[in-house]
């Protein structure tokens, strides 16, 4: 007769905790991750204090650290709200909307976006400043034309006049795209010290 050695309660709890941590790390690395909005560059789509979930699997499974895709699923498309590693400081994550993908030609004339020579239907972009800045001063309101290289995307914040984005620092490498934002699960209004209940559960478009 085989006598099975019983595990102690401490050992059972420790194993359960380790398994739970491993599952959480797997989910966070490959499936879904939570992020918090710290600035107003995506207003009114996303507000400061919004907490959202990002689908990391939708753009494929990447090897951590080297960011190489091992299981491709799909690539970001125009209109997607994506979280990515900020090219000028890789310790930070940014969130913006995809305006153009590889092969697209982007031009901005007096705040109007032209994509492949045609006026872009900009249903999410808002402008809070009527002043138009010449291209000789900075690229906010007049930019390009440029053609997006292979393996890159061109992104902009929905708050067009108050967003630091591809107009200023260039393209986002597809390897640095962490995922697609899809839902707000919590929202805290720090100015009024209250929960924005109407935003909880809101799908991000």
Image (cartoon, rainbow, N blue to C red):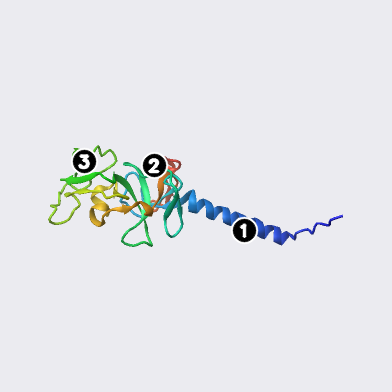
Residue 187 seen anywhere in this rendered image of the structure: no
Q: Earlier in the sequence, mark 3 or mark 1?
A: 1
Above or below — where is 102 with respect to 65?
A: above
Q: Residue 202 carries which label?
A: none
Towards the viewer: 166 or 38? 166
Residue holding disc 2: 204
Which secondary structure, mark 3? loop
Towards the viewer: 107 or 135? 107
Q: Earlier in the sequence, mark 2 or mark 1?
A: 1
In the rendered structure, the answer to whether residue 17 lies left or right of residue 40 reads: right
Instruction: Please name which of the two marks, 3 or 1, marks the residue nearer to the observer.
Output: 3
Q: Where is residue 69 in the image (x, y as percent from the top left)?
A: 43, 51
Residue at 40% x, 43% y is 74
Q: Earlier in the sequence, mark 2 or mark 3?
A: 3
In the rendered structure, the answer to whether residue 168 lies left or right of residue 23 reads: left
Q: Where is residue 175 in the image (x, y as percent from the top left)?
A: 38, 53
Q: Residue 18 carries which label?
A: 1
Q: Which mark is residue 116?
A: 3
Residue at 63% x, 57% y is 17
């Amino acid at each position: 007769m085989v006598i099975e050695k019983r595990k102690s309660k401490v050992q059972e709890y420790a194993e359960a905790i380790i398994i739970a941590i491993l599952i959480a790390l797997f989910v966070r690395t490959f499936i879904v991750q939570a992020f918090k909005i710290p600035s107003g560059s995506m207003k009114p789509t996303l507000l400061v204090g919004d907490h959202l979930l990002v689908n990391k699997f939708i753009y494929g499974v990447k090897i951590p650290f080297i960011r190489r895709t091992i299981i491709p699923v799909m690539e970001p498309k125009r209109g997607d709200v994506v979280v990515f590693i900020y090219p000028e400081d890789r310790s930070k994550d940014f969130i913006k909307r995809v305006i153009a993908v590889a092969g697209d030609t982007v031009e901005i004339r007096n705040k109007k976006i032209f994509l492949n020579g045609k006026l872009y239907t900009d249903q999410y972009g808002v402008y809070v400043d009527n002043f138009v800045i010449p291209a000789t001063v900075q690229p906010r309101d007049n930019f390009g034309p440029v053609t997006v290289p292979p393996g890159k995307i061109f992104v902009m914040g929905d708050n067009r006049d108050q967003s630091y984005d591809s107009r200023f620092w260039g393209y986002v490498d597809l390897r640095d795209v962490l995922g697609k934002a899809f839902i707000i699960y919590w929202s805290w209004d720090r100015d009024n010290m209250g929960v924005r209940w109407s935003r909880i559960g809101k799908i991000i478009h």
